[in-house]
Amino acid sequence: MIKDRPDFEFQTCVQPVNELRNRRVTDARFMAQLRAYHRSLGTWQDMSPPAIDGRKVDLHSLHCDVQRRGGAAQVDKKGEWGAIGSALRVGQGAGTRLREIYTAYLQEFVAAVEQGFKVEAADEDMEQFVQVENRLP
């Protein structure tokens, strides 16, 4: 713990509320599409929200981080699952578990979307995930 150190400084970051809202809506849209995709396969009811050591894994953030690194095959090749675990704040040692979560929840969905499959989320799917957006100031 740092107490009254005169040399302690940190950089602030201005993040307008509309940017936070847009991110929440994007997250909600992604989750609604993922849910709609798995519902079309009949697999959504079998899926509980993933967690590692009690920490919820944000599937949209996992998807974005994997895509930023070139996709799951590149992450596997470079052994970057641990780094993704650190970025998602679930721990660097959670790499294997993150790979399992990605495979179970996202891999088929990503492949289908890349092949041009259009996933339309139903209103009730979107509504469930947008509720968080309504709590923002």
Image (spheres, rainbow, N blue to C red):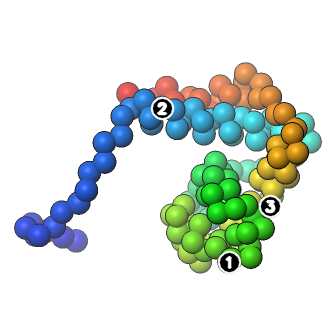
Give the mark nearest the N terminus, 1 or 2. Answer: 2
Q: CA distance from mark 2 to mark 3?
A: 29 Å
User: Residue at the spot x=57%, y=72% of the render?
Assistant: 83
Which element type, helix, strand or loop, lies under badge 1? loop
Determine whether, in the image, residue 1 is placed left or right of residue 16: left
Determine whether, in the image, residue 6 is placed left or right of residue 21: left
Task: State which quadrant residue 95 falls in.
Answer: bottom right
Which element type, helix, strand or loop, lies under badge 3? helix
Tag of residue 79: 1
Horizontal and vertical percent position of residue 44: 82, 43
Give the mark nearest the N terminus, 3 or 1. Answer: 1
Inspect the image, locate mark 3, and give the three-letter code of the amino acid beneath it: Thr
- Crowdedness of circle 3 by 10 Å Cα count: few (<14), some, many (20+)? few
Compared to residue 92, the image places residue 121 above or below, namely above
Task: State which quadrant residue 124 falls in.
Answer: top right
Q: Quadrant of the C terminus?
A: top left
Give the mark nearest the N terminus, 2 or 3. Answer: 2
Inspect the image, locate mark 2, and give the three-letter code of the amino acid beneath it: Arg
Tag of residue 21: 2
Tag of residue 103: 3
Q: Quadrant of the N terminus?
A: bottom left
Q: CA distance from mark 3 to mark 1?
A: 15 Å
Q: Mark 3 and mark 1 in contact? Answer it, CB < 8 Å.
A: no
Q: CA distance from mark 1 to mark 2?
A: 33 Å
Horizontal and vertical percent position of residue 91: 54, 71
User: Residue at the spot x=87%, y=39% of the render?
Assistant: 116
